[in-house]
Image: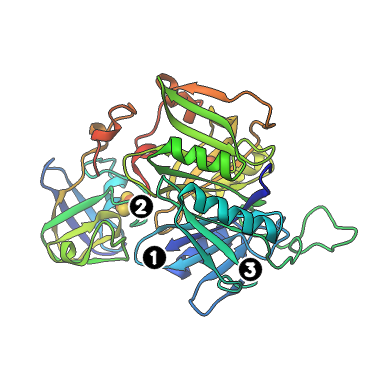
Amino acid sequence: MGRQHQVTEARSGQRFSCDEALPVLTAMEQHGLLCVPVGCRGGGCGLCKVRVLAGDYECGRMSCKHVPADAREQGYVLACRLFARSDLCIERYSKPCSESTVDPQQRQKVSL
Amino acid sequence: MKKGVMRPGHVQLRVLDMAKALEHYVDLLGLIEVDRDGQGRVYLKAWTETDKFSVVLREADEPGMDFMGFKVIDDACLTRLAGELLEFGCQVEELPAGELKDCGRRVQFSSPSGHRFELFAQKQVTGKWGLAEVNPEAWPRGLKGMRAVRFDHCLLYGDELDETLRLFTEVLGFTLAEQVLDGGTRIAQFLSLCMKAHDVAFILHPEKGRFHHASFFLETWEDVLRAADLISMTDTSIDIGPTRHGLTHGKTIYFFDPSGNRNEVFCGGDYHYPDHPVVTWTADQLGKAIFYHDRQLNERFLTVLT
Ligand code: FES
Ligand SMILES: [Fe+2]
């Protein structure tokens, strides 16, 4: 186990501890929380996009389609590729899973 | 096969990190690395395939599918189809022999759904991996992981499904094997070249050119369960399964490569002859059509794409 940091998701107010060796999304899943939507867990689909509001962090490789360089400068990252280096405050970017729809007629309205 | 297009030949996928991708596709899926090229692309094959490669990985800063290739019966057919694709209104580009290592010239085109496809007639034949050409044994020793049998199909998300269907049936000779109808709108189409339930499939999506999964064939349900065990053992990102699809009735598991591209391994499923009526599911049963046991879609099915 590495150092532990506290991560707070601003919209839900949910808080969990995160080992600095683990992606923030994995730590969240291990705590049974869903405050950030979980997709591919590989930095490819963009579903877990968040904005880091405060704290130090490092990132693994992620799709430039979802996080272009300028967005990255503004603190946007993919939570499945986000490693905490201090306590973090993050904010979910995409709609939570429960708001997306399985009705194909509604699908047009779902945006990522 | 009626227009000379025989079967899926290869898929080129973009990955964020080649070393991690190879751990996944070689050690976990059990594909075999056969070559690399000057661009850094890595060529892989599944053991039963007779051509040199079926999966090409390219490192890029965005995952997804570059193109899917189909093998046609001969060079004359390739020339004829290039003309017909142009006539249909496709953007056609010819790539010279050798652009993909040991592959003949390729005719690339875009479908109305926004995906890049290509046709080729010739590729180096290296035979089934690890087996003698004459008096072959049942299977080779030394296969890794899931021991994928062959690259089987891709499922792609995009719009303009009607025009895409017209291209694939009228120009390329596919038949519509299975579909999902939402009233008068076809929201899913599974297309076949032969006896398989699908060689390529499309699902309606507002954004063009998205990739849902590349699928690999396994022989038995036991193999699918063993694949699931390996996914857990390696802590690989799982999507859903093992379960069964309603569409095609294949027994399946979905999971992700380390760059977020979805993979499937599956066994069984329906067979299809060109005279068979189209198998139809209705949109109100979409959950069961996709995941036959859960009878509802997991949220990721419609939204997690590369
Ligand atoms: S879950 Fe797909 S990019 Fe993070
Ligand atoms: Fe599939």
- What is the tally of numbered marks visible in this picture? 3
Q: Which amino acid, by three-letter code, is at mark 1? A: Leu
Residue B98 in picture, x, y percent from top left? 60, 74
**Label drawn at residue B16:** 1
Task: From the image, tell me which residue sits under label 2.
Answer: A41
Chain identifier of the residue bearing label 2 in the image: A
Residue B68 in picture, x, y percent from top left? 53, 55
**Label drawn at residue B236:** none
Give the foreground label among 1 and 2.
Answer: 1
Q: Nearer the viewer, residue A77 or B57?
A: B57
Element type at mark 3: loop
Q: Are marks 1 and 3 in contact (CB under 8 Å)?
A: no
Q: Is residue B81 left or right of residue B161?
A: right
Task: From the image, tell me which residue sits under label 3.
Answer: B103
Give the foreground label among 2 and 3.
Answer: 3
Whether residue B281 is visible, yes or no, is yes
Q: Which amino acid, by three-letter code, is at mark 2? A: Arg
Whether residue B295 is visible, yes or no, is no
- Answer few, some or many: residues within 10 Å of disc 2's Cα (few below 14, many 20 plus, some between 14 and 19): many
Assign the N terminus of chain B to one quadrant of the image: top right
Q: CA distance from mark 1 to mark 3?
A: 25 Å
The quarter holding residue B142 reads: bottom right
Q: CA distance from mark 2 to mark 3?
A: 34 Å
Same chain? Circles 1 and 2: no
Q: Nearer the viewer, residue B94 or A9?
A: B94
Kindly identify the residue that appears in the image at 50 percent across and 34 percent down.
B189
